[in-house]
Every structure is written in structure tokens, then in C-alpha cells.
Amino acid sequence: MHIGNYLGALKNWVRMIDQYDCIFCIVDYHAITIEYNPADMQRRILNAAAVNIAAGLDPERCIIFVQSYVPEHTELAWILNTVTPMGHLERMTQFKDKSKQHRENINAGLFTYPVLQAADILLYHGEAVPVGEDQVQHIELAREIARKFNMRYGETFPDPVEVLSDAPRIMGLDGKTKMSKSLGNYISLVETPESIWKKLSTAVTDENRKRRTDPGNPDICNLFTLHKYFSRKEQIDRINTVCRTAEIGCIECKKILSDNIVEALAPIRMRYEQLISDPDYLADILHAGAKKCRDIAVNTMTDVKKKMGLR
Ligand code: SF4
């Protein structure tokens, strides 16, 4: 989880806890559709739980669990496969992108990934699904799958609808591509203060500003965008003026941003350190979440199977 995920998605999820009965799923079955190290999987699952809880997904107010703990996800996915046209899956742009990225491992799981995603949603009669723009096509497909099932077997699933965050795409520290862990252009939510400063000190600013005495343009500086999220209004207004008149250098400007990011992330990092040092507590949260989900999932599958003549 990096600050781009936090601003673009996680803050939105935390707000949604007040509006909906929320279920958050750590999708390990999706993760195995690309090459991975089995010896590292449990650490990654606990880490995902710790970061998300630390950043605001309070397990007292929402459900958080691991996908593979609830076997009904894959059971429903198989059934939904039988109402999903191949042509629809072939049109998924994310499958095309991932196939290019993982040419040596284009497996059937990668192809039917959106069907499992539809099962993740429909199993709980999910209605509002917070996603980024790159996932909207998958939610549209989930909606279509729900309708096809309903038409064939009778009204069962509601139409799931995507909920887009109002935060814009956060660019990486290279200023060129979206902030991404795989591209290494990110600041993690649990990054140390030293590392935050080290990364910001080499981050790309207004590339036309070659010397300290050159005026800069905050409108095209990626770090100014980050100031808008992490700095105080008076700091943002000042930088917006003094950058253009070269009264502030990029190093000083980056220092202000670094201090503000460190301050904003400090409580998240502290909570994360507590959680990750107590794996039993994290495991209890995930198993308790899975138990609540199974109660819902078993009911859904009983209804689905009855309607399909399988019970
Ligand atoms: Fe960007 Fe700040 Fe440098 Fe202006 S002073 S170009 S806003 S880093």
C-alpha cells in the first residue's frame, strides 16, 4: 500500500464504512494468477491486513477477511463461468495488459479472473463496489453476469455498481507514470521518515526549472499535487506564489512536503508496527471476518443451487 493507493482508494473505503455494511477481502486467489513465492504468501496476507487496518479499516466496524478462507468464492465463480460468454472475457483490457506483462504465464485463471471478482461481489449481494477506473470494466461485467444469472434462474443478485473515488490519479515520484509499487516510484504508507526524505529528495519536479534562480511552475509539478493532499492551506498558497518567483528552491519545498507526509503517516506507521508484531491478533481478526462471511456465503449458495436445480 502506497500513498497513491491511500489517497485514491483507501480513504474512500474508510468513508464508506459510515455509509454501508462493508466487507473487505484480501484476494489471495487473485494474487496466485501471476508468479509468486509460496513461502512469502502468509507474510503478504498479514501485511495487507495490518496496513489496511492501520490506515482505518476498523475491524469493529467492517468485515475484513481472506478470500481463500471462504470456499464459496470459487464455488460460485465456477457457476458464474457457465453464464459468462467467452467473448466478454476476451474484451477485458486488464487481461490483455496482464498477458503482455506475464507472457510466460498466461493461464486460465488470469483469463477468468473477472468471473471470480464477480463471485467476490455477488456472493454477498454487493451493491456498491469501490474501484479505480481501471476496474470499471470488470464491474460492468459483474453486472452483466448478475443479470444473465437472474434471467436464466430467477431474480437472485442485485446489480453491483462501481463507486469511484474523487481523488485523481496520483503520479509516481518520477512524475511520468502512475504511482506503482512495481515501478518503484512510490512512498509506502509505512515508509520511515528517513526513507520518505530520501525518495522525495530525488523526486522529479518541474523539469523546466534547471537552476535555483529559475522560476518554477507548480501547475506542472507533481510534488505540488502532493502538497495539496499533505500540506496546510497557507503552505500551499505560499508555495504556489513563491515557486513562480523563484523565492523558494525545490529542496526547501521538498523538505516542507517531507515533514508533512511524515507527520500524516506517523499514526498509521505506529499502529502498523503494533499490529504486525502481533500475528496471532491479526489472524484472529481475519478468521472472525471469514466466519461472518461464510454465514452469508452459505445462504447465498443454498439459494443459488436451489434455483439451478442442484439441491
Ligand atoms: Fe515543484 Fe516546489 Fe520545486 Fe515549485 S518549488 S517546482 S512546487 S518542488
Image (cartoon, rainbow, N blue to C red):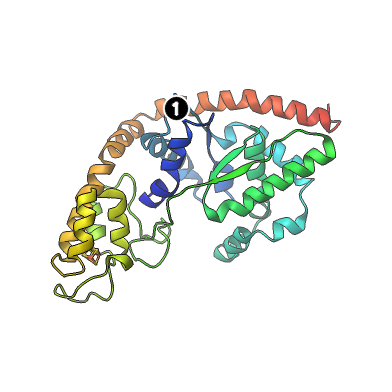
The reply to whether residue 38 is visible in this rendering is yes
Q: Is residue 194 visible?
A: no
Q: Taking 76 as reference, is 311 above or below it?
A: above
Residue drawn 35% across the image and 29% down it:
278
Helix, strand or loop status at disc 1: loop
Horizontal and vertical percent for residue 193?
22, 48
> Viewer-proximal residue, 249 or 112?
249
> Which quadrant holds the C terminus?
top right
Q: Image height check: is 84 above or below 173?
A: above
As drawn, 276 above or below 91: above
* Residue 227 location, quadrant: bottom left
The residue under label 1 is: 59
Residue nearest the viewer, comparing 153 with 97:
153
Q: Is residue 253 left or right of residue 272?
A: left
Residue in view at x 23 percent, y 74 percent: 209
The image quarter containing residue 190 is top left
Choose top left, top right, bottom left or bottom right for residue 249: bottom left
Q: Position of residue 299 (x, y in %)?
A: 70, 24
What residue lies at 84% left-to-right and 40% top-to-bottom? Answer: 152
